[in-house]
Image (cartoon, rainbow, N blue to C red):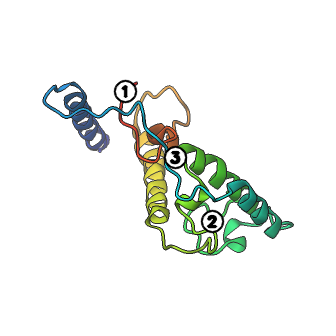
Amino acid sequence: MKNLKSTFIIIPTFLLLLLSIFAFNNDNVNKVDFSERIVVRQDTTFDAEAALAELREKIKGRENEPAEDVYENLEILNQMPAGRFLNIMNRAFNNSLGVSCDHCHNPDSWESDEKPTKQITRDMWKMVGTINQELLANIDNLQSERPAVNCTVCHRGEIKPSFSIK
């Protein structure tokens, strides 16, 4: 059974390696220069710091309650304390993708699902969980006790994942 699990990890990893070698070393493939990427914000008039200050004021006294009890329409990070949830949204997601809150949210209706980027983020968070809890956990001989990936591993501060080698 362990050999079967290894096969399910080794074969896709090998195929990804071959694909990346082909994509980055084949002169017939159109190459893309990622060195001059520009981060585009949804709304340049949106003031993230003011919005976060307003949200912190709104949840004052409830910072240690589970996020799902304080905010509406949560599907990830539900049990995290509400105050920490805001910090994760601001520092982890925003910085990892080089965006502001309004990239995924309508600041007039935070709970709204009107922007597709909100669901994409939820789905990618699940993908990160699968990688960390299932795939990395089954790789023998890793030097780290708790190997993990996060949004920054692929996005590196950019909206679109960065696959270029710099």
Q: Is residue 145 left or right of residue 37?
A: right
Q: Which mark is residue 97?
A: 3
Q: Is residue 63 visible?
A: yes
* Residue type pointed to by label 1: Ile
Q: Is residue 62 above or below residue 33?
A: below
| Direction right: furthest residue | 61
CA separation in Å, label 3 and label 2: 21 Å
Q: Which label sits on residue 165?
A: 1
Q: Secondary structure at mark 3?
A: helix
The mark that comes first in sequence, 1 or 3, is 3
**Residue 135 on image: x %, y %:** 40, 44
Q: What crowding class fits label 2: few (fewer than 14 Cα within 10 Å), some (14-19), or many (20 or more)?
A: some
Left or right of residue 8: residue 69: right
Which quarter of the picture shows residue 50?
Answer: bottom right
Q: CA distance from mark 1 to mark 2?
A: 35 Å
Which mark is on residue 62?
Answer: none
In front: label 3 or label 2: 3
**77, 37: nearer the viewer:** 37
Q: Is residue 128 left or right of residue 94?
A: left
Identity, as a three-letter code, of the amino acid under mark 2? Asn
Q: Residue at x 43, y 66 (%)?
A: 116
Q: Residue 144: x, y in percent?
A: 53, 29
Q: Amino acid at mark 3?
A: Leu
The residue drawn where x is 46% and y is 49% is 128
Q: Is residue 17 above or below residue 120?
A: above
At horizontal 65% and vertical 52% (from top left) the residue drawn is: 90
Residue sitting nearer the eye, 132 or 35: 35
Residue 78: mark in rendering? 2
